[in-house]
Image (cartoon, rainbow, N blue to C red):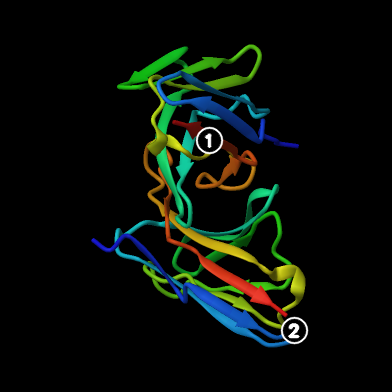
């Protein structure tokens, strides 16, 4: 099992550019989510999905879109990048059965100039 | 609203015990969690406790739960330099989705040789 994979590991964008952060998991987990981690702010939930075709907003969804066409993939799209979106982005997945062990990807470090 | 509070920094000497404290707000959480983040990596589940327990011990780790005060602590016995990391406390957020967790800002543990 590869677990949760994220690409790219690093990305630099100019203000106004768009891009997609990729996330995939091979554990057949129903639940997937995207977080951003900023110094002194901890982890903040951007969007989440409880299954294919179902997505919902988290705490900080503005400027981001998601879709979940398959169980395995949960891409995060930045429509028009802004310097405030400079952050480290983590994708996570978990089963919805029993206790909630979230499995995290290695992260994408994004810089918006 | 829901909030999870932790102190941001803790410094200990190798061989001493470390105690990381957390307060949470959602008394409906079935489980409470401790996650560990090593430099440059995503979070990993360290341990969890069921809400009807007061204590859980797992090798060098002891979790104490005081439901009345909504206080959770993580004790690491015989702390080693390899324990240097950021430790996150998390509660469940059923107001959003069964999969959502609310994380504290994280406590950075530094272990001095």
Q: Position of residue A88 (x, y in %)?
A: 59, 63
Count all numbered tags in the image, as a single digit. Answer: 2
Q: Position of residue A50 (x, y in %)?
A: 48, 57
Residue extending furthest toward the front: B113
The reply to whether residue B89 is visible in this rendering is no
Seen in the picture, residue A82 relative to A39 is either above or below; the reply is below
Q: Position of residue B39 (x, y in %)?
A: 48, 52
> Left or right: where does residue A4 sit relative to residue A85?
left
Mark 1 surroundings: few (<14), some (14-19) or many (≥20) residues within 10 A = many
- Toward which corner of the image does residue A17 lie, by quadrant? bottom right
Q: Quadrant of the C terminus of chain A?
A: bottom right
Q: Is A106 or A74 nearer to us in this picture?
A: A106
**Residue assigned mark 2:** A15
**Residue assigned mark 1:** B110
Q: Residue at x 56, y 68 (%)?
A: A109
Q: Is A39 or B35 nearer to us in this picture?
A: A39
> Left or right: where does residue A2 sit relative to residue B32?
left
């Amino acid at each position: 099992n590869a677990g949760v994979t994220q690409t790219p590991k690093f990305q630099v964008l100019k203000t106004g550019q768009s891009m997609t952060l990729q996330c995939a998991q091979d554990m057949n987990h129903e639940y997937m989510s995207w977080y951003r981690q900023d110094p002194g702010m901890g982890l903040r939930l951007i969007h989440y999905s409880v299954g294919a075709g179902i997505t919902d907003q988290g705490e900080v969804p503005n400027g981001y879109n998601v879709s979940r066409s398959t169980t395995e993939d949960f891409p995060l799209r930045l429509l028009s990048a802004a310097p405030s979106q400079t952050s480290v982005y983590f994708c996570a997945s978990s089963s919805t059965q029993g206790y909630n062990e979230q499995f995290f990807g290695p992260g994408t470090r994004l810089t918006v100039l | 609203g829901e909030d999870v509070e932790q102190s941001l920094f803790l410094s200990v000497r190798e061989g001493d015990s470390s105690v990381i404290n957390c307060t949470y707000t959602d008394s409906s959480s079935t489980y409470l969690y401790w996650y560990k983040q090593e430099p440059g990596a995503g979070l990993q589940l360290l341990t969890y406790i069921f809400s009807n327990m007061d204590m859980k011990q797992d090798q060098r780790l002891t979790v104490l739960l005081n439901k009345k005060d909504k206080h959770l602590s993580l004790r690491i016995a015989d702390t080693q330099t390899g324990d240097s990391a950021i430790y996150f406390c998390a509660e469940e957020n059923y107001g959003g989705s069964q999969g959502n967790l609310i994380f504290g800002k994280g406590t950075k543990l530094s272990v001095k040789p």
